[in-house]
Image (cartoon, rainbow, N blue to C red):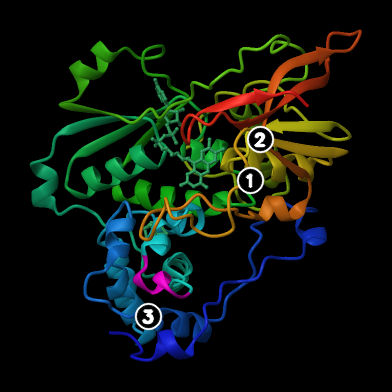
Amino acid sequence: MADPKGFLTTPRQTPARRPVDVRIQDWREVYTEFGRGELERQAGRCMDCGIPFCHNGCPLGNLIPEWNDLVWASDWRAAAERLHATNNFPEFTGRLCPAPCEAACVLGINAEPVAIKQVEVEIIDRAWAEGWVPPQRATAAAAGAGRRVAVVGSGPAGLAAAQQLTRAGHAVTVYERADRPGGLLRYGIPEFKLEKRHLDRRLVQMLAEGTVFRCGIEVGVDVTVGQLRDDYDAIVLAGGCTVSRGLPVPGADLDGIHQAMEYLPLANRTVADRLIGAGDGRSGPAVSSRPARGPAISARGRHVVIIGGGDTGADCLGTVLRQGAASVTQLEIMPRPPERRSDSQPWPTYPMIYRVSSAHEEGGERVYAVSTQEFVADETGRVRALRLVDVVPAGRGPETWGAASR
Ligand SMILES: Cc1cc2nc3c(=O)[nH]c(=O)nc-3n(C[C@H](O)[C@H](O)[C@H](O)COP(=O)(O)OP(=O)(O)OC[C@H]3O[C@@H](n4cnc5c(N)ncnc54)[C@H](O)[C@@H]3O)c2cc1C
Ligand code: SF4
C-alpha cells in the first residue's frame, strides 16, 4: 500500500492549465509542469483497496495500485516497467484518455478520486527523460521463428499491434494511406492536446525495433488485398473509421459547412508544416512523399457554429479559437448534464456530468437542448444562419426527445 494515511491527509491536485490568453497564441499543450514531490504525494492517496475497481474501469487493465505504490516509494523506474506491462503507449493515454479509472476509483465514492491519469503521464514522461524506454528488439531465436505480418492502419490500434508483433519476433510492415503514421493521434487530435513529438518519439523507437512503415499507400487502391495475402502470413486490419455522420437537413451542402474530420486533419497538417518550417526538427519519422491533400480551412475572422458538444466538438473549438475566429457557438442536442453523478449513473460507472475541457475555458458559448432544422444561405450560396428548435423530453423515456415551439 502507498501512504496509509495519504487519502486522509492529502487533497487531490492536478496540474494547472497555462493562462488562456497565453495558450491560445500557440499550439503547445495546455498544462504546466507538475512537481515530482507533489506527484508522489498524489500517488500516495491510493488506498490499495483490495478490490481495485480502477482495474476494471481502465480498458487496458492497467495495474494502477502497483504503480501508485512504486511512485510513492520513489521507485519510478519500476513503476514505468509495471505501466508498460499493460500499455504500449502511456504517453498517449496519460494525455488523452477520459480516465474511466478515476470514475471507478474506490476513493471516489465519498471523496475526490486518485489523480491516476496524471500519475500515468508523469511516470512515462520521466521514463523517456531518463532513457528508460529503449527499443526492445526480439531475440534472434524469436525472430527466426517469426512470420511476415501486414498491419493496415497506423492509428493507436495498428501501432500497438505492430509493436507487440515485432517484439515477438515477427517481420511487421505497417501500411498507412496518409503521409505520416499515427492515425487520429496525428491528424484528428490537435497539437494542444497531444504534441506530435510524443508520437514521433514512439515511432523512432518502433523503427529501431524493426517495424517497417509504408506511408502514402492505401490498401485496396495502391496495393491489393490479394498482393498482401501473397506476401504475408497474416494481415491485421486496424483501419479505424473515417466515415462521418451527415446531418440530413435542407442546406447541408452549402459552402462553409464542413465535417470535423475534414477540417481537423487539414488544420493539424498546417500546424505540423509550420513546426517543420520553423526548423524545430519535428518533421517526424516514416514520412511519405505523398503531398498533403487540399488547402487548409481557416476560421480566421469567421463566425463559427460547431454542431456537437462532445470531445471532437471541443477539439474543433480549441482549433478555431487558435485560428482567430470572430465568434464560436457550440450546439448540443442533449440538455446540460448535471454537475454531479445522477442516481441512474452510480459509482463505478463513467458518468455523464458537466465537464469543462481546456477548449471550453478558452472561449465560445455552449447552447444545450437544440437541434438544427435547416441551414440558410446568403446570396452567394454560403451558409449564413441556422434554423434551430428547442428539444425537450417527450416524456416517453429517458432517450425520447421531441421538438418544442419557441
Ligand atoms: C477529433 C478526435 C479527437 C479524439 N480525441 C480523443 C481523446 O482525447 N481521447 C481518446 O481516448 N480518444 C479520442 N478520440 C478517439 C480516438 O482517436 C480513436 O478511438 C482512435 O484513434 C482509434 O484508433 P484506431 O487505431 O482504431 O484508428 P485510427 O486512429 O482512425 O487509425 C486508422 C488508420 O488507418 C488508416 N487506414 C484506413 N484505411 C486504410 C487503408 N485501406 N490503407 C491504409 N491505411 C488505412 C487511416 O488513414 C488511419 O491512419 C478522438 C477522435 C477524434 C476524431
Ligand atoms: S487514464 Fe485511461 S489508460 Fe490510464 S489508467 Fe486510467 S483508464 Fe487506464
Say if residue 366 shows up in the picture: yes
Left or right for 220, reference 260: left
Which residue carries the number 3 mark?
A: 71
| Residue at horizontal 24 percent and vertical 11 percent from the top | 226
Inter-mark Cα distance, 3 to 1: 38 Å
- Check if mark 2's residue and mark 1's residue have beta carbons within 8 Å: yes
Of callouts 3 and 1, which one flags the residue occurring earlier in the amino acid sequence? 3
Inter-mark Cα distance, 2 to 3: 44 Å
Q: Residues within 10 Å of mark 2 (few under 14, many from 20)?
A: some
Which residue carries the number 1 mark?
A: 336
Q: Is residue 185 above or below residue 69?
A: above
- As helix, strand or loop, the secondary structure at mark 2 comes to loop
| Residue at horizontal 48 percent and vertical 36 percent from the top | 398
Foreground pick, 400 / 71: 400
Q: Which residues are magenta?
A: 105-111
Indicate the quadrant where residue 277 lies: top right
Foreground pick, 241 / 59: 59
Of callouts 2 and 1, which one flags the residue occurring earlier in the amino acid sequence? 1
| Residue at horizontal 36 percent and vertical 70 percent from the top | 132
Which residue carries the number 2 mark?
A: 369
The quarter of the image that holds ligand 1 is top left
Horizontal and vertical percent position of residue 14: 56, 72
- As helix, strand or loop, the secondary structure at mark 3 comes to helix
| Image quadrant occupied by the C terminus | top right
Indicate the quadrant where residue 52 lies: bottom left
